[in-house]
Amino acid sequence: VHKAFGEATAVLAGDALLTLAFKILASDETHPDPNVRLRLIERLADASGARGMVGGQMIDMLEDDSPRDLNTITRMQRMKTGALISYSVEAAGIIGGASENARQALAGFAQDLGLAYQIADDLLDATGDQAVVGKTLRSDAAAGKANFVTILGVNGARERVRLLAAQAKQHLAFFHERAHILLQSVDYVLDRTR
């Protein structure tokens, strides 16, 4: 949208879609129990607001003003990308009435998967084939922007993805064979080329 219609329109479109998400969550059609709907709205507000996506984006925007280390990059990506991935998994647990232990396992899984996805994205930006990936690559390096690859190196970033993927799968052990689709999502992150 920002390429076709400009950055201001893209920001407004994002605002409109987020507002629509809250409307959908508030609807009786989402869940008959108003307490479930309130919990979904509360958690989305956390994931998308200052403690989540917006806060992570602010850290990203401040990059020029402060040096980046691994802890800062990790925190930024857990907030910016990971919070919404975590929410999507957590929301399923809330809607399904999962136990507290199950929701904790899902939250751990989602946090590790979200961070693994971001590191895999950094690896694709640094080492991918533009024709396969389908977007402009090496943009972080060209902008002098710190990310997992610039801090850990390609091999270190690959090792971090494998570690996070293993941790994500370990969280799913709680669910045994019922987690096969979620396990496949971990493999997708490990194997993605675009």
Image: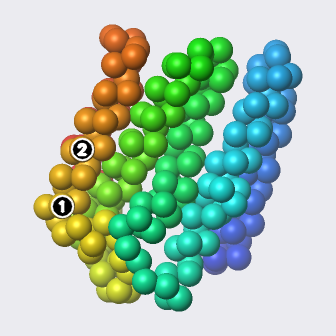
Query: Viewed as shown, does residue 191 lie left or right of 176?
Result: left
**Label 2: how many Cα within 10 Å (few below 14, some 14–19, many 20+):** some
The disc placed on residue 163 is 2
Q: Quadrant of residue 51?
A: bottom right
* CA–CA distance in space, label 2 to label 1: 10 Å
| Residue type pointed to by label 1 | Gly
The disc placed on residue 156 is 1
Image height check: is 19 above or below 149? Answer: above
Tally of numbered tags: 2
Q: Is residue 134 visible?
A: yes
Q: Residue at x 28, y 39 (%)?
A: 165
Q: Residue at x 31, y 29 (%)?
A: 169
| Residue type pointed to by label 2 | Leu
- Which of the image's four quarters has the N terminus? bottom right
Q: Quadrant of residue 121?
A: bottom left
x and y percentages locating residue 20 in the rendered image: 78, 46
x and y percentages locating residue 7 in the rendered image: 64, 76
Q: Residue at x 34, y 49 (%)?
A: 116
**SS assignment at label 2:** helix
Comparing 129 with 114, the one in front is 114
Q: Residue at x 43, y 83 (%)?
A: 67
